[in-house]
Image (cartoon, coloured by chain):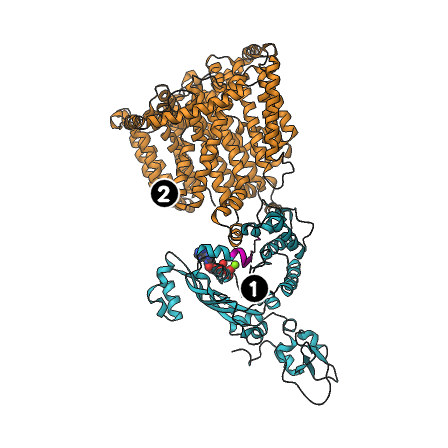
Chain colours: A orange, B cyan
Amino acid sequence: MSTFTRGFATSCLKTWPWLIVLILTAILLTQRTEFPQIVAYPEAWTLPIAEAVSAAMDGLVEWVQHTARAISGGLNVAFSAVQWLLIGAPWLASVSLFALIAWQGGGWRLALLTFVLLLYVLTSGYWVPAMNTLSLVLVALPLSVLIGFGLGYLGYRSHRARQAIMPLLDLMQTVPAFAYLIPILLLFGFGPVVGLIASVVFAVPPMVRNTILGLQNIPPAVLESARMSGCSRRQQFSWVEFPAALPQMLVGVNQTTMAALSMVIIAAIIGGFNDIGWAVLSAMRKAQFGQSLLSGAVIVILAVLLDRISAAYAARQLPTSSFCGLPLRRFALVFVAILAVTMLAGYLFPVLHDWPAWLTYSPAQAINEATTQFVRAYGDLMAAVKNGMQFFLLLPVKLGVERAIVPFTWGITFTPAAKVAYWVIALAGCAVAFGLSWWRAGVAILVLAGVIYFGTTGLPWLTVLLLISLVAYQVSGPGLALFAGGSVAFLLITGLWEPAMISVYLCSVAVFLCIVFGGLIGIWAASSEAVSGIIRPINDMLQTLPQFVLLIPALMLFQVGDFTALLAIIAYAIVPMIRYTEQGLRMVPKTLIDVGRSCGCSAWQLFWQVRLPQALPQILVGINQTILYGLGMLVIAALVGTTGLGQAIFVALGEANAGAGLVAGLGMALIAMTTDRILQAVIPG
Amino acid sequence: MTTQAEPKLSVRNLWKIYGTNPKRLVSGDFQTMTHAERLEHARENRHFVAAADINFDIYEGQIFVIMGLSGSGKSTVLRAISRLDEPTAGQVFFDGTDLMAASPKELTELRRRKMGMVFQSFGLLPHLDVLDNVAFPLRAQGQPRDKRLARAREMIELVGLDGKEHSYPHQLSGGQQQRVGIARSLAVEPELWFLDEPFSALDPLIRSQMQDEFLRLQKQLHKTIVFVTHDFLEALKLADKICIMKDGEIVQIGTPADIVLRPANDYVMEFIGDVPLAHVLRAGDVMSPPWTDGETHPTVPRDAILEEAIKLFDDSTETVDVTDEHGKILGSLHPLEVIRSLYHDDPEHAH
Ligand SMILES: Nc1ncnc2c1ncn2[C@@H]1O[C@H](COP(=O)(O)OP(=O)(O)O)[C@@H](O)[C@H]1O
Ligand SMILES: [Mg+2]
């Protein structure tokens, strides 16, 4: 018993800052009915930051409008040219040329796949919107690649430039794309060019990162042997640095392509252009699930083709590759020849020019009916699942059990006696943990009990501010504490507190479920080749698809609401959790496992005491990625009806309110960066 | 002998100091300080002295080996000579001209025509096949394609890699990759050949093979060589002159026999500790003046290792004569002196 009391005492000593915050919170909460501003941050204390940004934006627009419009005009010309090539030319020409490009990268099988999938797109009747989207991607891609390469090379050559570029990349990738659609809209005017520019912005970072990575990974001896061979600076670049970094840079081109596609599709939300993203979006808005599913399938096809073809070109550059296509000049010749022949054929035979209507086939109606039937048959079950999740998981986290447990949902009343019991159990749990010297667990129990009792939206903002700063301080130091506290303060003074906490609530539930289920799947996949073989292509698919597409099935089955958004977020954010868990467990050195076995560990002990601790750093990386993915998807999930920061950005987009959109977007980015940095500090090594 | 000629490469008062501002550190009083004061001065200003006051001469056709433990500053010296890293102070004379004064353009030209370097980690270009890798320095020289490929083929044959012309570096073993590195460094027919631990990454068996081949090549080519290694046996096997370094300073310079017979201090002694001296010392290293007692003695060539010479002693033979390549007697071996030279702790030899 004496060790227990001693443990308790030392735990209390170690946790005094936490205890002070928690006691302060308890006092605040007792006063909350009298002073509602304890929980709801008063509007009078906010600053008009969004308005200031809007005003600055207006000034900027005034100032650079002419340049911006000129750029936009130039891009429009380039885009129209590509569009004319893809849509104006006979379909036979486009399809054949794509197949040829695929062949040059990856051989017959890829060419055949391209040919067949494009024929399907023609058959589906979404050819024109698909080619419109593709035109945008094809114009955005070279721009992103060039800009990304330029910045990457600059960052490689100059340390100072790199220090400026890296945080910029973080920002470009964590600020939700919707947020910067608004200023682009204001600067460049309506039209497809907005999506184009947004996707250039969004697609540049992977190119920059991979360029820097590729150049930095060149072994020093390679560069020195070039210098000792008497290479001039320019020779060293074009004969050594560029070719040696090329494979990695092509990985960058692949990622950039996918990012550009994803963004072009997301940008459809500003509307006014007949692209495939718009086809999905409008079908979703009209609740035509068959149509949205079919157009979604076309997006999937575009994603698969772009991914496979760009990945094939990347693989082709490796010296190991056996297939290398035609020499460039011969390829150009064949290209022109095929173009001429197919053009001619198209003009001679109209069937080869415009895809005949009788060859299109759309099972949209059938899908709609099947969905209706499915919903009719299993509607009760699905409603039960949905309500169960709503009542027992989502609402308690959002509102707290204090407000969520009502007879209508739980069938019971949360009586004062039960409330007292709740807190007694929580305090007892904390005391036991303290006594065992697990002071971290003790604090965690109290904080968790508080969050579940009052809900994320019912916590005093001061508590959140202090707790997050304290966590940041303890894992890293005053620098991170300042950053974290500053981020929370930013959300407070911009008046975004309430939507931010709603976002946090939805994201934490999603992340929690991802960790549980993703972790389990990862463990399963690590122990079975068969499962791993099934999971891997599904993961690849989920990651390659533009996030947008994931909304469709969720929406189809569960209609608009938090639960649907939750499903979409999980579908996207669970992937890294599965991946890193499996990878972490698989990477545990075999000798360690043998050591465990020879010490007589049971399989259970082996898992908990050898494999899991070894895999933990990887798993933490996975959790970190899952959180970032979840926050990224949150904004897109706002399309299917969640409130929170995502919706704030949408509203701003609808009103073309640059200030509100940017501030909300920055708010999202700050949440993401804060959690990222705290977790990075926790991850060992 | 070579000692009368002008040195091919002279290093004078070479310093390499790492830190925030090494140039400022060596300006001012630095020139007038004693050596110990300089080291103290650098340490006080939180700078790291990687090479301190390095001086040596290398003559044409010589294999000069810089030997020392890892971190002793061997690569630093080599890289300073080739100006891959700028030295903090000092001069390097190549055929009498100061390399440190060479403009970037002159330096590029020197590297293109006069220098070759082999790296421990090979430094092959991953995207080029063996042929193009070997031809690479010639490409930098601006030679036309067929000419440089023909020359590269010769080099590939020289290092025994024929048939591998179109393999890529990742398809070759470590030993084969280093052969490519050697072929590449020789392609421009350099006068100065730098090798930085070329064989350290290889397995012992391959390493020994490569050392033999290196000696064979040198017999053919007569380059002036700076060879860096941390392997004392390798140094003994390859070197004409060995320079032993410790913590950025030179401890001793001498022929392999000088080093093992007259180690400068205990530090050098420790290296010699487990060297099989009978394999390292040569008859000429330990002979005394010719012993003329009217009889004819068995003879060994001057560069025979002692192990071979010892076999000639038997019950009736107490003297073995050492001859030069023309059979002229240079000196004699006596059992007692041979034994003494093989006995490490001889107090006469350790100072
Ligand atoms: N760029 C650098 N900055 C600081 N110290 C360095 C740098 N390069 C080498 N050193 C230090 O100089 C010392 C000598 O290095 P080096 O010449 O590479 O040793 P080695 O004898 O193993 O070739 C080492 O202690 C190393 O840590
Ligand atoms: Mg070295």
Badge 1: how crowded within 10 Å, few (<14), some, or many (20+)? Answer: many
- Is residue A324 at all visible to an observer of this figure? yes
Magenta span of residues: B111-125
Q: Position of residue A667 (x, y in %)?
A: 36, 30
Q: Which residue is mark 2?
A: A12
Query: The disc labelled 2 sits on which kind of residue?
Result: Cys
User: Which chain is home to disc 1?
Assistant: B
Q: Quick check: do tags 1 and 2 share a chain?
A: no
Quadrant hosting residue B86: bottom left
Q: Position of residue A505 (x, y in %)?
A: 41, 27
Check residue B117 for magenta coloring: yes
What is the secondary structure assignment of the residue under circle 1?
Answer: strand
The disc label shown at residue A140, or none: none
- Quick one: B100 or A5, which is closer to the camera? B100
Nearest to the eye among marks 1 and 2: give it.
Answer: 1
User: Which chain is home to disc 2?
Assistant: A
- Quick one: A98 or B348, which is closer to the camera? A98
Q: Position of residue A374 (x, y in %)?
A: 56, 13
What is the secondary structure assignment of the residue under circle 2?
Answer: helix
- Quick one: B123 or A390, which is closer to the camera? B123
Q: Which residue is mark 1?
A: B225
Quadrant hosting residue B299: bottom right
Query: The disc labelled 1 sits on which kind of residue?
Result: Ile
